[in-house]
């Protein structure tokens, strides 16, 4: 009786574990690269168009001659809808925000079918939420519903606030600068 045989008898199932480990290593070593090669060859990747949308940040910085600190100020004003005092930066804010709105409108037109699908999914979700409210009212179980409403607001309100940033930035930076 050899050493391997004695060891295999000492631990039942150890040969199966070792075999499974070698098979797993073989699948990782051979299967993973083959999977990556196969996924990389799909037509989906050829449809992607790098640079299809212009680099708005770089274009605005170049067009208005912004330094890095000024570009950060302008970006913050566009994102959060803040008002700036410098007329040159105000013009850059309005330019950048209008460009973002134009790109968003083009995207909306290009993906109209997806937008309809999202609206339908949101309507279905609202129906389910209405059913949950009704069920909670009948059973008197408000805890899970209030928790769900809280987390929905935590995720939705900041997104809605950020979405209105360019519009607020245009409103606040279009006219003459504020008197300081």
Image (cartoon, grey):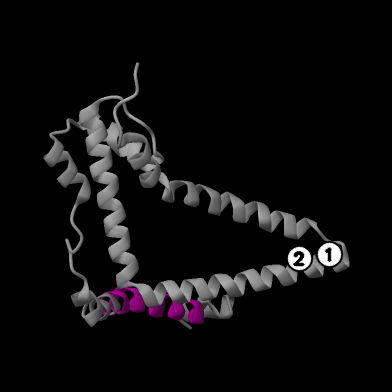
Residues drawn in magenta: 15-34
- Distance (Cα) linking label 2 and label 1: 6 Å
Alpha-carbon neighbours of circle 1 within 10 Å: few (<14), some, or many (≥20)?
Answer: few
For residue 66, what is the image quadrant? top left
In the picture shown, does residue 145 fall above or below 123? above
Q: Nearer the viewer, residue 26 or 53?
A: 53
Residue shown at 19% from the left, 52% from the top: 55
Label 2: which residue? 133
Horizontal side, residue 20 vs residue 94: left or right? right
For residue 125, what is the image quadrant? bottom right
x then y, percent, for residue 3: 46, 76
- Considering the whole magenta stretch, tell me its main secondary structure: helix
Residue shown at 84% from the left, 64% from the top: 137
Residue 23 in the magenta stretch? The answer is: yes
x then y, percent, for residue 120: 52, 76
Residue shown at 45% from the left, 75% from the top: 116
Whether tag 2 and tag 1 are in contact, CB under 8 A, the answer is yes
x then y, percent, for residue 98: 27, 49
Horizontal side, residue 50 vs residue 4: left or right? left
Horizontal side, residue 146 vs residue 176: left or right? right
In the picture shown, does residue 32 fall above or below 76? below
Label 1: which residue? 137
Residue 94 in the magenta stretch? The answer is: no
Asked whether residue 170 appears in the rendered view, the answer is: yes
Q: Nearer the viewer, residue 39 or 136?
A: 136
For residue 38, what is the image quadrant? bottom left
Horizontal side, residue 141 vs residue 122: left or right? right
Q: Give the number of marks.
A: 2
Asked whether residue 42 appears in the rendered view, the answer is: no
């Amino acid at each position: 009786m050899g050493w391997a045989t004695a060891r295999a008898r000492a631990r039942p199932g150890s040969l199966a574990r070792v075999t499974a480990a070698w098979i797993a290593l073989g699948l990782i070593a051979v299967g993973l690269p083959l999977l990556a090669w196969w996924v990389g060859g799909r037509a989906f990747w050829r449809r992607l168009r790098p640079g299809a949308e212009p680099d708005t940040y770089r274009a605005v910085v170049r067009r208005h001659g912004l330094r890095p600190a000024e570009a950060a100020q302008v970006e913050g004003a566009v994102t959060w809808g803040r008002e700036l005092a410098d007329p040159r930066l105000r013009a850059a804010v309005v330019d950048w925000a209008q460009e973002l709105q134009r790109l968003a409108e083009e995207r909306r037109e290009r993906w109209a079918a997806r937008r309809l699908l999202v609206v339908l999914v949101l309507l279905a979700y609202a129906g389910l939420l209405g059913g949950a409210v009704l069920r909670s009212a009948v059973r008197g179980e408000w805890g899970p519903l209030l928790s769900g409403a809280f987390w929905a607001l935590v995720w939705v309100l900041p997104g809605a606030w950020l979405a209105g940033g360019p519009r607020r930035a245009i409103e606040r930076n279009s006219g003459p600068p504020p008197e300081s």
